[in-house]
Image: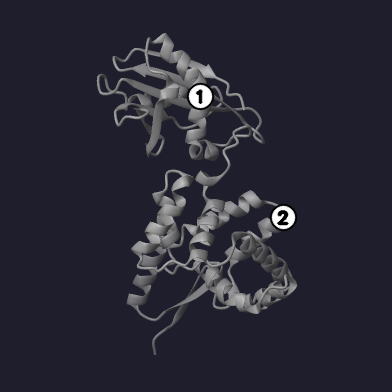
Amino acid sequence: MSNVVLVRVGDRDIRVDTVEDLEKLCSSLKELLQGECQYHSWYIRIPPERLLALLRKAYVKYTQGVVSVGDVISEYLEENKLSKSLARTITPTLSSLGLASSGRFTSSAVEVGRLLYEGRSSDARERLRALALKNCVLKEILERINDCAELEKATETVLASYGKSVRFDELKYTVELLKMVSPRCRECDLRCATAETIYACGERIIQLAAPHIRELFEKLDISLLPEHLNYVNAEPSTYLLSVKGTAKQIGLILLGPPVEGADLQQMKNALARLDERVVEGVYEVYIKILPILEGDERCKSVKFLVEVVRGDLERVSKFVKPSF
């Protein structure tokens, strides 16, 4: 008689009867640890605010010993005077995000609900983002966008590539969910800055640095005016510069990683890495912007080290304190 082993993984018990079963389990765990997506079904048919309210309620009911998805959904719909038929759209949405399994809320769902109950909405969004990245379809959408403005188009393109006939409400609620969890779609208020907002708010950083770029252009006798230039995000932290009304590319804007405090060695290292992209004679101008985070951990301020490099490698720089 063969031995049967049950292995608990997250919220599931996995039965292992044979060596092949064990190898398959090890392979799936390896993929999970490497951050690969896990859920292949896609179905987002409820507004994000309704999803959050439901998860908050799921946590409250969990503390009372209720873990059944059906019971919590029924009570939620009744309390909010919503049609019971909506359960048909809520349940598969929860499953697509790894929030429900086998008729029960997962530990991830309870965790998100707890964070919402405690008023920690930012932490709850981060946890939801991690869950969205476990869905292969949503992960592909998020990986395609460099800017939030691209989100709706990217969603349509990816869903079409999966052979899906997209309903209006599915597209709308998928985009709204991804806007809520994607750092690229957060409002770029840098008055209290974090490394995450710095990475997500490249265009806002360029806008804040722009008045000072003109001054640096003048010091290098560059005849171009920054307000006559367009910039397009070409890849993470890199923007192509062109003259408005033309297709001529005349330079690059290079955004460095955020530096914590006035650490001169850190700044030198970050600038040196950006300098690897600067090549004499290739473009007319390079603009390097290095964000520097300072101050209290609870609300860091940001300033920039802005450096303009002419095509012959002459350069000038200054520290900039942005005006909000």
- Disc 1 is placed on an element classified as helix
Residue 19 picture location, percent across and down: 33, 76
Q: Position of residue 118 (x, y in %)?
A: 72, 55
Q: Residue at x 53, y 46 (%)?
A: 185
> For residue 165, what is the image quadrant?
bottom left
Give the image location of residue 217, x and y in percent. Answer: 41, 15
Q: Name the residue nearer the viewer: 37 or 78.
A: 78
Q: Nearer the viewer, residue 231 or 44?
A: 231
Q: Amino acid at mark 1?
A: Ala
Secondary structure found at label 2 = loop
Vertically, is 261 above or below 312? below
Callouts 1 and 2 close, C-beta under 8 Å: no
Crowding near pointer 1: few (<14 within 10 Å), some, many (20+)? many
Estimate the spatial distance between the alpha carbons at disc 1 and disc 2, rounded to whole Å. Answer: 38 Å
**Quadrant where the image shows the N terminus:** bottom left
The answer to whether 64 appears left or right of 109 in the picture is right
Image quadrant in which you'd find residue 87 = bottom right
Report the amino acid beneath label 2: Glu
